[in-house]
Amino acid sequence: MSADQPLIESRVDLSAVRVVMVQQLWRQPELSDVEAATMAALERTGALERITSGDEIAITAGSRGIATLPAVLRTVVRAVRDRGGKPFVFPAMGSHGGGTADGQRALLADLGIDEQTIGAPIRSDMSVVQIGRLATGVPVYLDAQAARAQGIIVVNRIKKHTSFDAERESGLCKMAVIGMGKHRQAVTMHRFGNQGLASLIPEVAACVFERAPVLAGLALVENARGGLASLTGLRPEEIVRAEPDLLRYAKSLSAKIPFHRIDIGLVELLGKDISGTGMDCYVIGRKRVIAEPEWPEAPEIHSLVVLRVTPASHGNALGVGLADFTTEALVREIDWPAVRANVLASGNMERGKIPFAYATDREALEAAGFRERHTSPGDLRLVAIQDTLHLEYLLVSEALLPEVLANPDLAVVSTAMALPFDDAGRWHSPFAPRG
């Protein structure tokens, strides 16, 4: 045996695996006129009536891929300007973008949010001012530019958080705290751990809504396809109280993988524009927080493969540690300063660790096949997805067909095919391009 030969074979030929494309048949609400919904929400809050000529109004923008966010922001900007105000957009994303002003501006640009598309300046600055302190001693920070403005309009999606369960998870409260408080508030809050976040975010948010010049909150709830299911305008004093009901509604609409036991899961793309953890932890059933259990109702994926990081992430491959196998191409793209800033701020170290990395996509998947070698390739329960945000279409192995055919919310939309690798071992996505 030559010195460069492995002692044992560490991959399994998966050419016997046959897959079909499956569509999830979601029947959910969707608002067709985003501009009208935004204006109705603003009018409900009375925010526009409180703007006088010359007032500077700060409008939040986060780091997530929210399909309707550019349209919502354009409408808010126009409405503020029509009242004589001077709107500007500021990144409200904590430590994302490497925790730098330029990095956060670039993240927004990749999400289609810049001065040309939104119609207002983007003011990106990591400076904060302290506006309060809880009785427990926790300081409360706010973006310095927003603090100097005459008004703030908070815009964000309500959804499940990727690390903890609570009445308020990811939404207006979290954005007001960790987003609007920038890197400094993110570091301050995350030192209390996930359960500390769950209990402290509402308290800090209440302080922000009382002391900062917040005019309104716009709460977006998406359907499983990423369309806008509802848009609720809230006065600042209503936000903390209203979020639990909105979160329950958002969870009822959220996209999921419709299988519980999966031998191999393949995710084409992870990214900060997809989820704060690169891959939505609830979708893949892995949050990887030491001493905390996974969600029992979420999928159990025994071997997880991730292939690439989205261009909009600028190398922030946070979440790669949630996988078991990846590619050398993904590892080469990692911007370590950005990952370190994000991981150290949260304290969830497992999510930034590197799985076994392989030269080709095929080798990474075949390594997962070797791990699952107790099951013959033709019987493997395999699911491939584009990313954890876009789940209408799934590529599933024939071993899962009985469950597909028994589920009235699923439809087979292709004939059986081989796994979509080319001769060089590169995975060719069978899904439609994102966006």
Image (cartoon, rainbow, N blue to C red):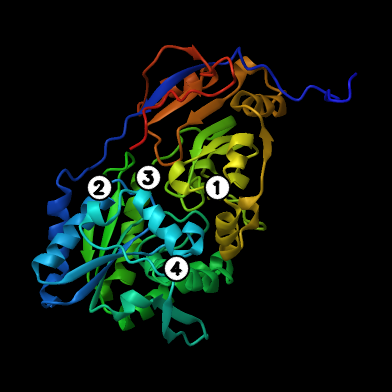
Q: Which percent across, then down, holds residue 64? A: 39, 52
- The residue under label 4 is 178
Name above or below for residue 235 compared with residue 368: below
Q: Residue at x 46, y 62 (%)?
A: 166
| Mark closer to the chain start, 4 or 3 | 4
Q: Are marks 2 and 4 in contact (CB under 8 Å)?
A: no
Q: Which mark is residue 22?
A: none
CA–CA distance in space, label 4 to label 3: 23 Å
Q: Is residue 347 left or right of residue 269?
A: right
What element does badge 4 sit on?
A: helix
- The residue under label 2 is 229
CA–CA distance in space, label 3 to label 2: 11 Å
Mark 4 or 3: the one toward you:
4
Q: The C terminus appears in which quarter of the rendering?
A: top left
- Residue 15 visible in rendering: yes
Q: Which percent across, then down, holds residue 283? A: 48, 43
- Of 306 and 339, the residue lying toward us: 339
**What's the amino acid at mark 4?**
Ile
Q: Is residue 337 left or right of residue 47?
A: right
Q: Quadrant of residue 20?
A: top left
- The residue under label 1 is 317
Q: Which percent across, then down, holds residue 350? A: 65, 53
| Mark closer to the chain start, 1 or 2 | 2
Q: Residue at x 17, y 57 (%)?
A: 75
Q: Is residue 18 left or right of residue 88?
A: right
Q: Which mark is residue 254?
A: 3
